[in-house]
Image (cartoon, grey):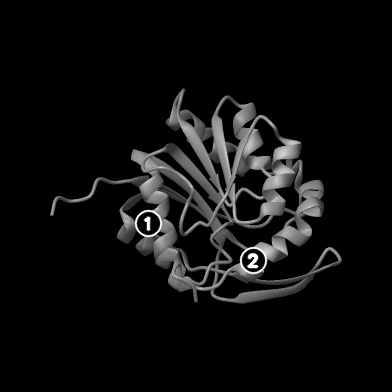
Amino acid sequence: MSDLGHDISDIRDSYDAVAEEYATRLHEELAGKPLDRALLSCLLEQTGPGGTIADLGCGPGHVAAWLTGNGAHTVGIDLSAGMVETGRRRFPEVEFRQGDLRELPAKDGEFASAVAFYSIIHLHPDDLPRAFEEMRRTLCPAGLLLLSFHMGEEIRHMGEWWGQQVNLDFRFLAPARIAALLEAAGFAVEMRMERTCYPDEAETRRCYFLARRLPRDPA
């Protein structure tokens, strides 16, 4: 373990290995996800003009690019240098930063809102509270977080992905636990939605939360 918590070098290295193929295959992913687009549009509307939206665990940046194309200033943050490099090349209109969800490269209150689509699913459960605290830290007062994950209790391990050797655990998460962790970190969950998978997705049930950053109670 590092000072941050559990070692995540395998996550970084695995996504480095598949970055270009991932970007190629998922470049138009949102075109086939109407509910995701609707939720992103809702986030855009509530963010308002001038606010910066963070895409946390952005991968090659296709979600950040969609937000930018619809009028947002967006910052994509990903652990993988390969993903960040690929994103910068494909989407020069998006600002990219390399960083860890548990120690985000951002100032306090920098973001008006944030998206974290399936980016917490590789973290060890013990690291989730710190990641949520970081999300709260980097959001402005009353800022919104749109979060998604696979529902359940299983762990699916992947050792090979698109012809590349990887070492990734995909952790399914219980919505009640995630809601409790968000609330403990200083968020109020305003919306919860579940959906089944689209035809081209992995066969999992997915959960979405929209949570708002609350002020801390005075000591």
Tell me how far mark 1 sits from mark 2, CA to CA: 21 Å
Residue situated furthest right in the rendering? 163
Quick one: quadrant of the C terminus?
A: bottom left
Query: Mark 2 — residue?
Result: 11
Query: Mark 1 — residue?
Result: 133
Could you say which disc has been placed on residue 206 in the image?
none
Residue situated furthest left in the rendering? 219
Image position, residue 92 (x, y; %) = 69, 32
**Is any part of residue 187 visible from this angle?**
yes
* 107 left or right, relative to 96: left
Image position, residue 41 (x, y; %) = 55, 33
Asked if the residues shown at circle 1 and circle 2 are in contact, with their CB atoms under 8 angstroms apart, the answer is: no
* 218 left or right, relative to 111: left
Looking at the image, tell me whether mark 1 or mark 2 is earlier in sequence order. 2
Seen from the viewer's position, the closer of residues 112 and 205 is: 112
**Is any part of residue 203 visible from this angle?**
no
Image position, residue 192 (x, y; %) = 45, 52
Residue situated furthest front in the rendering? 3
Question: Up-down: is 110 above or below 179?
Answer: above
Q: Residue 156's image quarter?
A: bottom right
Image position, residue 100 (x, y; %) = 53, 57
Hey, what amino acid is under mark 2?
Answer: Ile
* 54 left or right, relative to 94: left
Hey, what amino acid is under mark 1?
Answer: Glu
- Which structural element holds mark 2? helix
Residue in the picture at 22% in, 50% down: 216
Packing grade of label 2 (10 A; few <14, some 14-19, many >=20) is some
Residue in the picture at 62% in, 38% down: 64
Question: Up-down: is 54 above or below 193?
Answer: above
- Which structural element holds mark 1? helix
Packing grade of label 1 (10 A; few <14, some 14-19, many >=20) is some
* 9 left or right, relative to 158: left
